[in-house]
Amino acid sequence: MAEAPFGLLAELTHRCPLRCGYCSNPLELVRRDAELRTDEWCSVFDQARELGVLQFHLSGGEPLARRDLPELVAHASGLGAYVNLVTSGLGLTAERMADLRARGVDHVQLSVQDAEPGDADRIAGVKAFGPKLTAARVVREAGLPLTVNVVLHRLNLDHVGGIIALAERMGADRLELANTQYYGWALRNRAALLPTRDQLRRADEVVAAARERSRMEIVYVIADYHEAHPKPCMYGWGARQLTVAPNGDVLPCPAATVIEGLGVENVRDRPLGGIWFDSRSFNAFRGVDWMREPCRSCPRKEVDFGGCRCQAFQLTGDAANTDPVCSLSPRRELVDRILAAETGPVPVAMRGVGR
Ligand code: SF4
Ligand code: FES
């Protein structure tokens, strides 16, 4: 029997004012008229709390694009959940922040694209740097803890020292530096975003030194294509967290729609608890019994859970294969070929839908 989930990623909408080429949301975004209504989201929150979920991450797209965000925050907080607002910061005024705080936001996670305004706005595809400084200020003035989140790739990895300094100036308590994960739109831009080994080595050194001296907690998510072992994706499929997409699809991980034939179910058709415990999609790769060799007899199988199911599907066509990032995978050469081929400057295709 599975354990109860710990966290809910509620993707309230796919609408977003930014156009980042590293966006990991699906190629096909959920349209506004297909989004769950306010009462449906409130019901999702009720069901999640009943299941035992303690942390609600209100995300998107841009959650501020939902006019009913204050109501949703109040409902989530009223259930006793810890409410994390995951935002681009665009449109986060002092008044809105004060209101959201009063209604129960506990923490804000703010995305940043790069250290300097020109570079950052080029990556975001809009003038976002200034509004993000404002957003960081209003979060701090509201007395809330702030995490700055930065997706790293070839275009900004060399600026990681400046990015750390910027997060410190913004007053962040925590900085998440996450190398790009190649799902959804980002996969399309992989050739433009993949960093070089030299870039990664230099960034590793800068991050290690900053961790020694900075008062911020710095979390660093590695570039897994370049590693010998895969990431422990989601800390196991259907183990800790569930995602509800804007249209009510319930996903074992945010990218799971890439896996064809998974049998994703929707909260409009079945209660959340039934989907978490009994659905085919959540049980497909839960635990370790589904594993094939070399994972099945590997001592790391409870450490990395065989890597990422979405990556295994995207790169090998079968989600039950060992993540080909693993050096023990018989398909590792797929990743090596990508690394050897995709190292030149290529333009980034900006995300252009759902705005
Ligand atoms: Fe992880 Fe499987 Fe590779 Fe072992 S063989 S390290 S369990 S991905
Ligand atoms: Fe889906 Fe890793 S992103 S399992």
Image (tube, helix red, strand yellow):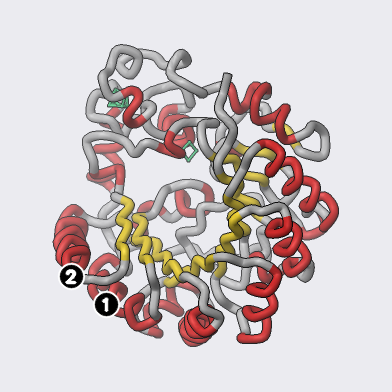
Closer to the camera in the image, 175 or 193: 175
User: In the rendered image of this protein, does residue 102 appear above or below residue 251?
Assistant: below
Q: CA distance from mark 1 to mark 2?
A: 15 Å
SS for callout 1? helix
Of the residues shown, which amino acid type is indicated by label 1?
A: Gly
User: In the rendered image of this protein, does residue 281 appear above or below residue 139?
Assistant: above
Residue at x 36%, y 53% (from the top left corner):
191
The answer to whether the beta carbon of the residue marked 1 is less than 8 Å from any atom of ligand 2 is: no
Residue 23 is at least partly visible in this image: yes
Horizontal arrangement in the rendering, residue 180 relative to residue 52 (left or right) = left
The answer to whether the beta carbon of the residue marked 2 is less than 8 Å from any atom of ligand 2 is: no
Residue at x 52%, y 73% (from the top left corner):
144
Q: How many marks?
A: 2
User: What residue is disc 2 on?
Assistant: 213
Image quarter (top left, top right, bottom left or bottom right) of the C terminus: bottom right
Q: Earlier in the sequence, mark 1 or mark 2?
A: 1
User: Counting other residues with Cα less than 10 Å from the Cα at mark 2, is it few (<14), some (14-19), or many (20 or more)?
Assistant: few
The image shows residue 4 at horizontal and vertical percentages of 59, 32
- The numbered mark at residue 162 is 1
Residue 59 is at least partly visible in this image: no
